Amino acid sequence: MPPEESSYPADWLRLGEKDLDRVKRLLDENDAELAGFCLQQALEKFLKAFLLFNG
């Protein structure tokens, strides 16, 4: 993604998926605190994608 924020929902979905992958790895490593933070970040990115998709 360019330095400025993308206006393409697919970019935000891709970033959200990366955060979700981090959540899964962190939970496997018993790091619930950081997993919770990454989950919150993923949800924000999914919400941003949803809002951009729906105008």
Image (cartoon, rainbow, N blue to C red):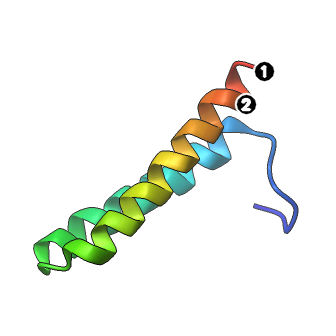
Which image quadrant: the C terminus? Answer: top right
Quick one: 14 or 46, which is closer to the camera?
46
Q: Residue furthest top?
A: 54
Residue 28 in which image quadrant:
bottom left
The type of residue carrying mark 2 is Leu
Q: Is residue 41 left or right of residue 3?
A: left
Q: Is residue 14 left or right of residue 6?
A: left
Q: Are marks 1 and 2 in contact (CB under 8 Å)?
A: yes
> Can you give x and y, in whole percent of width and height, for residue 35 in the image?
29, 69
x then y, percent, for residue 27: 17, 70
**What residue is shown with label 2?**
52
Compared to 16, does 50 lie above or below? Answer: above
Q: Which residue is at 11% across, 78% downward?
A: 30
Q: Amino acid at mark 1?
A: Gly
Please tell me how crowded label 2 is: few (under 14), some (14-19), or many (20+) other residues with Cα within 10 Å. Answer: some
Residue 29 at x, y = what percent? 14, 81
Residue at x-position 27% and y-position 75%: 33
Query: What residue is shown at x 81% (from left), y 41% (from top)?
Result: 7
How far from the left and from the top, in percent, is residue 18? 45, 60
Indicate the secondary structure of the residue bearing disc 1: loop
Q: Secondary structure at mark 2?
A: helix
Quadrant for the N terminus in the image: bottom right
Q: Is residue 26 left or right of residue 54?
A: left
Compute the Cα span from label 1 to label 2. Answer: 5 Å
- At label 1, counting other C-alpha atoms closer than 10 Å, the crowd grade (few under 14, some 14-19, many 20 or more) is few
Question: What number is the disc on residue 55?
Answer: 1
Pick the front one: 18 or 46? 46
The residue sitting at 60% across, 29% down in the picture is 50
Check the image and report above or below for 17 versus 23. above
